[in-house]
Image (cartoon, coloured by chain):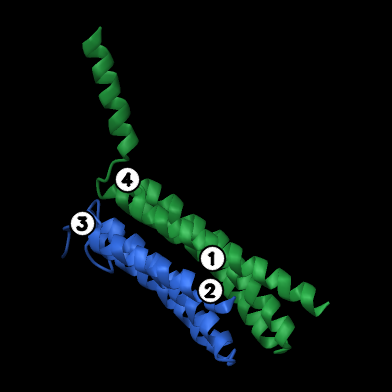
Amino acid sequence: MLIAATTAILITMLLALTRGILGPTLYDRILAANMLGTKTVLIIAVLGFITGRPAFLDVALVYALINFIGVIAVLKYFEYGSLHHAEKHDTPDEEQP
Amino acid sequence: MQSVLVILEWICLLGGSFFLLVGGIGILRFPDLFTRFHATSVSDTMGAGLILTGLMIETLVQQHGFTPLVKLLMIAVFLMITSPSATHALAKAAIHGGVKPRLADRAKAQDDENGADR
């Protein structure tokens, strides 16, 4: 059954990768990358149980954290144009002394 | 008792695989960005939740101990929190970026057609 779950996760990753390559807008690609990251967490966990080493779960946990932070960082970059000074996007103050 | 746990694990893993495949087909086939969010959330909540539940039962069957169970629970809770918030941020960024839902355009187009018919 673990092999069947691995196969399903791999097929889903292929479908998400196809959407990431085809995707008409930027946000489709980010969505596909996010889904690919979630499925990577799952496949790391399942592969840890297949090989009999549940210590792989640490890697899966760290990958989940990094995936979320990465998606949020990419979104912030493309929404505001930079990774800092996000609050001053609408009203850029030019009163530099 | 052991066989009941194994059957439960099979049901969870097969159900999770089914929802993952449904989400994958949905993200490929749906016509719009905002409908693709729906497919992604299906595979991120039901698929990942069921597969992680199956793995938790696997730790009980294989008697790996207490630590993998807690780690799997942490991964499940973290995915349940972060996946909807990432989707929310993505939808907000898409709206800011000027992506319109397709149904809004279609409703407007139908209104225009009806107006033209009258």
Which of the two marks, 2 or 4, is nearer to us in this view? 2
Give the total number of marks visible in the rendering. 4
In-image side of A18 versus B48 (left or right): left
Quarter of the image where the C terminus of chain A is located: bottom left
Residue B31 disc label:
4
Which of the two marks, 3 or 2, is nearer to us in this view? 2
Q: Mark 2 points at which residue?
A: A4
Is disc 1 in contact with disc 4, using a CB cutoff of under 8 Å?
Answer: no
Question: Which chain is home to disc 3?
Answer: A
Sequence-first disc among 3 and 2:
2
Question: Which chain is home to disc 1?
Answer: B
Is disc 4 in contact with disc 3, using a CB cutoff of under 8 Å?
Answer: no
- Above or below for A40 versus B19: below
SS at circle 4: loop
**Could you give the CA–CA distance between mark 2 and mark 4, rounded to whole angstroms?**
29 Å
Q: Name the residue under label 3.
A: A93
Q: What residue type is labelled 1?
A: Ser
Give the crowd class for mark 2: few <14, some 14-19, many >=20 residues within 10 Å. Answer: few
